[in-house]
Amino acid sequence: MVEDLVVLVDDDGAPCGTAPRATVHTEDTPLHLAFSCYVRDDAGRLLLTRRAVTKRTWPGVWTNSFCGHQRPGEELTDTIHRYAAHELGLEVVDLEQVVPDFRYRAVDASGLVENEICPVWTARTSGTPAPNPAEVEETRWISDTELRAALDAAPWALSPWLALQVPRLDAAGWASAVPR
């Protein structure tokens, strides 16, 4: 079995060590590598997921399709495919890194910290999600208009990284070629 490690990085994003994923998110989380992925279906709808209520950070919060952590030496595209299969039972295609330099730090209600360099990707699927209940409470296919309405009406119900990423995705033209 592969040990589930995350890659720790310095302020410039250079790898400087590893830590077990299960122990890295604390009140003093070190900067580490992660990714976020937004998945669309063939009709252009966006897949949102609600984090499992058993998750340590942001339990029960609606967020992007999925996100995760790259293991040492793992190609990021392999990481994305691994998480899509593990969290949602999906195969994804047309991977595209849309926001390569996204970085954020956020503190949840329990005091746990996310502190990540987190490139943002988009992908497409023809599959139907089969959520892993340890990761995902529920899923919903929505339009971009519905996403923006949720951000306007109840930003507290959405993950802070989603709220920060959507304007960056818009600036990169992520939604310009799909139906709204």
Image (cartoon, rainbow, N blue to C red):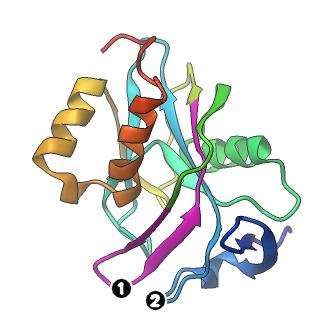
Q: Mark 2: few, some, or many residues within 10 Å (few <14, many ≥20)?
A: few
Q: Is residue 119 magenta?
A: yes
Find the magenta span and give its range.
Answer: 104-122
Q: Is residue 117 magenta?
A: yes
Q: Is the residue 83 above or below the residue 59 in the image?
A: above
Disc on res. 56: none
Q: Nearer the viewer, residue 153 or 49?
A: 153
| Badge 1 or badge 2: first in the primary sequence | 2
Tell me the residue that label 1 is attached to: 111
In terms of image quadrants, where is residue 11? bottom right
Q: Is the residue 50 above or below the residue 99 in the image?
A: below
In terms of image quadrants, where is residue 97? top right
Q: Nearer the viewer, residue 96 or 100?
A: 100
CA distance for labels 1 and 2: 6 Å
- Helix, strand or loop under label 2: loop
Residue at (51, 89) in percent of width and height? 28
Q: What secondary structure is the magenta-colored segment mainly?
A: strand
- Helix, strand or loop under label 1: loop
Q: Name the residue type under label 2.
A: Glu
How many labels were placed on the picture? 2
Tell me the residue that label 2 is attached to: 27
Residue at (42, 46) in percent of width and height? 165
